[in-house]
RNA sequence: GCGAUCAUAGCUCAGUUGGUUAGAGCGCCGGUUUGUGGUACCGGAGGUCGCGGGUUCGAGCCCCGUUGAUCGCCCCA
C-alpha cells in the first residue's frame, strides 16, 4: 500500500438521488418484491421484462408533452447513432409499446406484471429518488370493469400480505370516458377562469397545462375554489356511470374497502375512467404508495390498434419503508470457528460439506478466538462448531458442536455428512467428534 | 425549479463567548480475565472537522460560495 497521497484519487460520490442498500433495508426491499411475485402468480399475471431505455417518443407521446415528467424530469440523451433515448420514467408506456411492436394483441386480454428501476430527475426527498423502483401490473386489451376491479383486489391483497394495509386507504375516482372528461374539463376551466384572481401562482400555471390538477392543490388559497368546483358526476355519460358502478360493485363483492375521492385526478394525460391511489399519512409528503387507473387511449396514441387497458404501479421503496416490525433474518444454522490458523483448511472443507448437505453454514475467521465466538453469536446462528485440526496428532481433527439448544437433529445431520468422507468417532460422554481416516 | 435545516473518527454524536496537541460511546485490532461464554478489564489503530474561498494575531465555531443529505413546495409510485 502506498502512502503517497498525491496518487490518491478522490472517491467519486454516488449520483444524487440514487441509493446503495445493505442489510435491513435491502431485506425489506427484497421482501416486497417477493410478496409481489407470490401474489401476482395467484392472480395469473405473466411476468414480463421490458427495456430500461426506450425511444424518447414512447414517453413524450403517451404521458403528455406538458406533464412535468416529460417536460423536465426525463433522463434523455442522444445515443451514438443520434437517436433520442430516454431512461424509462414509468412502466406503462414501455409496456404499451411492447404490446404493439410484438403483436401481443393475439394474447388479449393480457395480464402482465414486472418490476425494476425507473428514473426521474427530481429533487430527492423522503420516498422520492432519481432512481427508484416500482412494482407494476397491467391488463391490456380488456374493456371490462372486472379487470379494473381485479387489479384493485390484487393490490389490496398485496398490501395485506405485506402487513401494511392498516393505515393505507384506497381512494377511488372516475375520470369518465373521453366525452365525459372533455365536458368536465371545459366546465372546470370555466369555473377556475372565473376565480382567476384568487388562484395561487402554481394553479395559474396549471390552468393552462393541466386544469384537473388544481383540484388536488394543497395551497390553502386554492382550496375554497377547488372545493366549489363542479364534480365530474354531473358530466358522466350513462356508460361511464355504469362502468364506475361495476368497478365499485366488484370491490364491494370482494370486501375491499374504498373511499370515493371526487378530487382525485392523475398527473399523466392518458388516464380515463377509473383512477385510484392507495394513500397513507405515514410517509410525509410522498403519501401515494400505489396508484394507477385505466388508459384506454394510450396504445392507439402510440400507433397501435384501439386497445383498452388498465394498470397500476407501486413504489417499492415506499412500501419497504412502511414495513414495520423485524423481518425474519436469514441466519446460519451453524457457524464454524477454526481453533487456530492450522485448522482453517479443515474448516473450509467441512463448511463446503455442510452447505452441499443443505445446512446453512458460515465461518468466523477474523479476530482472536474470543471475538470469533462473539461474531458467531452475533450472526444469530443456532450452533457453533469448533474445529481443531490435527489434535490429537494422529487424527485429522476434532469438532465440538456447542450451544445445543434443541437436541440432536442438526448434530445427526452433521454426523451423517461427515461419515461420507471420514471415519468418525462420536464420543457420547465428551460430545467430541473425532475425524480420523479419510474414506 | 423554490424554501428551510444540517454536514466533526467506520457508525451515533459532544465540542463553551473564536484561543495550546479536536473528545466520548459503539465498532475494529491486540491482550488480560473467564472458560459452554453476547455483559469485566488494559492497550492500540483510526480525523486535511464535506469541499473552496474570506474575516481574524488565531476558525471545527463567524461570513460567502459549492457539493451532498434531510424535511417541505412542486411532482409522483
Image: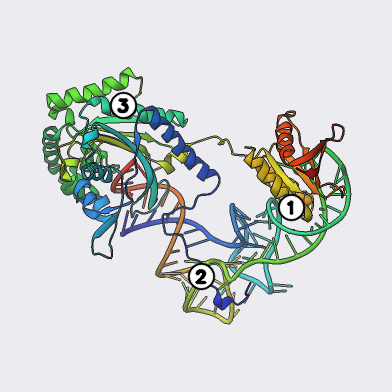
Residue A193 on image: x %, y %: 13, 43
Q: Nearer the viewer, mark 2 or mark 3?
A: 3
Quadrant of the image containing the C terminus of chain A: top right
Query: SS for tag 1?
Result: helix
Residue A201 seen by the camera: no
Q: Do the dots labelled 2 and 3 sit on one chain?
A: yes
Name the one closer to the observer, A117 or A280.
A117
| Residue A10 badge | 2
Q: Do the dots labelled 3 and 1 sit on one chain?
A: yes
Query: SS for tag 3?
Result: helix
Determine the CA span between mark 2 and mark 1. Answer: 37 Å
Residue A10 on image: x %, y %: 51, 70
Q: Earlier in the sequence, mark 3 or mark 1?
A: 3
- Residue A422 relative to residue A206: left or right: right
**Residue A359, picture quadrant:** top right
Badge 1 crowding class, 10 Å Cα cut-off, few under 14, some 14 to 19, many 20 or more, is some
- Residue A136 relative to residue A352: left or right: left
Q: Residue furthest top?
A: A253
Badge 2 crowding class, 10 Å Cα cut-off, few under 14, some 14 to 19, many 20 or more, is few
- Residue A287 relative to residue A396: left or right: left
Residue at numbered disc 3: A150
Q: Nearer the viewer, mark 3 or mark 1?
A: 1
Q: Nearer the viewer, mark 2 or mark 1?
A: 1
Residue A387 seen by the camera: yes
Q: Residue at x 46, y 59 (%)?
A: A14
| Residue A344 badge | 1
Amino acid at each position: 500500500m502506498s502512502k503517497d497521497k498525491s496518487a490518491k484519487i478522490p472517491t467519486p460520490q454516488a449520483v444524487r438521488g440514487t441509493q446503495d442498500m445493505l442489510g435491513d433495508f435491502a431485506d425489506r426491499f427484497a421482501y416486497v418484491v417477493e410478496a409481489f411475485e407470490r401474489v401476482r402468480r395467484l392472480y395469473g399475471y405473466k411476468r414480463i421484462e421490458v427495456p430500461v431505455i426506450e425511444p424518447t417518443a414512447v414517453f413524450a407521446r403517451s404521458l403528455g408533452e406538458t406533464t412535468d415528467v416529460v417536460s423536465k424530469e426525463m433522463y434523455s440523451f442522444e445515443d451514438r447513432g443520434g437517436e433520442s433515448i430516454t431512461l424509462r420514467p414509468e412502466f406503462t408506456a414501455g409496456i404499451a409499446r411492447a404490446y404493439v411492436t410484438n403483436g401481443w394483441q393475439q394474447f388479449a386480454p393480457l395480464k402482465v406484471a414486472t418490476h425494476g428501476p425507473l428514473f426521474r430527475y427530481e429533487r430527492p426527498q423522503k420516498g422520492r429518488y432519481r432512481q427508484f423502483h416500482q412494482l407494476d401490473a397491467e391488463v391490456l386489451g380488456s374493456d371490462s370493469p372486472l379487470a379494473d376491479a381485479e387489479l384493485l383486489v390484487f393490490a389490496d391483497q398485496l398490501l395485506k400480505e405485506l402487513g401494511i394495509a392498516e393505515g393505507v386507504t384506497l381512494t377511488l375516482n372516475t375520470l369518465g370516458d373521453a366525452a365525459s372528461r372533455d365536458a368536465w374539463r371545459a366546465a372546470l376551466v370555466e369555473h377556475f377562469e372565473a376565480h382567476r384572481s384568487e388562484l395561487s401562482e402554481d394553479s395559474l400555471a396549471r390552468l393552462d397545462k393541466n386544469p384537473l390538477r388544481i383540484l388536488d392543490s394543497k395551497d390553502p388559497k386554492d382550496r375554497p375554489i377547488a372545493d366549489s368546483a363542479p364534480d365530474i358526476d354531473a358530466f358522466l355519460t350513462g356508460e361511464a356511470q355504469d362502468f364506475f358502478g361495476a368497478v365499485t360493485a366488484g370491490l364491494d363483492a370482494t370486501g375491499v374497502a374504498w373511499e370515493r375521492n371526487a378530487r382525485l385526478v392523475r398527473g399523466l394525460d392518458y388516464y380515463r375512467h377509473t383512477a385510484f391511489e392507495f394513500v397513507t399519512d405515514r410517509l410525509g409528503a410522498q403519501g401515494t404508495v400505489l396508484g394507477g387507473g385505466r388508459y384506454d387511449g394510450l396504445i392507439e396514441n402510440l400507433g397501435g390498434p384501439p386497445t383498452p387497458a388498465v394498470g397500476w404501479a407501486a413504489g417499492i421503496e415506499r412500501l419497504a419503508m412502511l414495513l414495520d416490525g423485524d423481518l425474519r433474518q436469514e441466519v446460519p444454522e451453524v457457524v464454524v470457528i477454526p481453533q487456530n490458523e492450522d485448522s482453517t483448511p479443515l474448516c473450509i472443507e467441512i463448511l463446503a460439506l455442510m452447505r452441499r448437505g443443505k445446512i446453512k453454514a458460515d465461518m468466523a475467521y477474523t479476530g482472536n478466538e474470543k471475538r470469533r465466538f462473539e461474531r458467531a453469536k452475533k450472526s444469530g446462528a443456532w450452533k457453533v462448531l469448533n474445529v481443531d485440526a490435527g489434535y490429537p496428532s494422529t487424527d485429522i481433527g476434532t469438532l465440538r458442536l456447542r450451544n445445543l439448544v434443541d437436541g440432536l437433529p442438526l448434530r445427526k445431520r452433521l454426523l451423517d455428512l461427515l461419515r461420507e468422507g471420514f471415519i468418525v468417532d462420536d464420543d457420547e460422554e465428551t460430545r467430541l467428534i473425532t475425524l480420523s481416516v479419510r474414506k
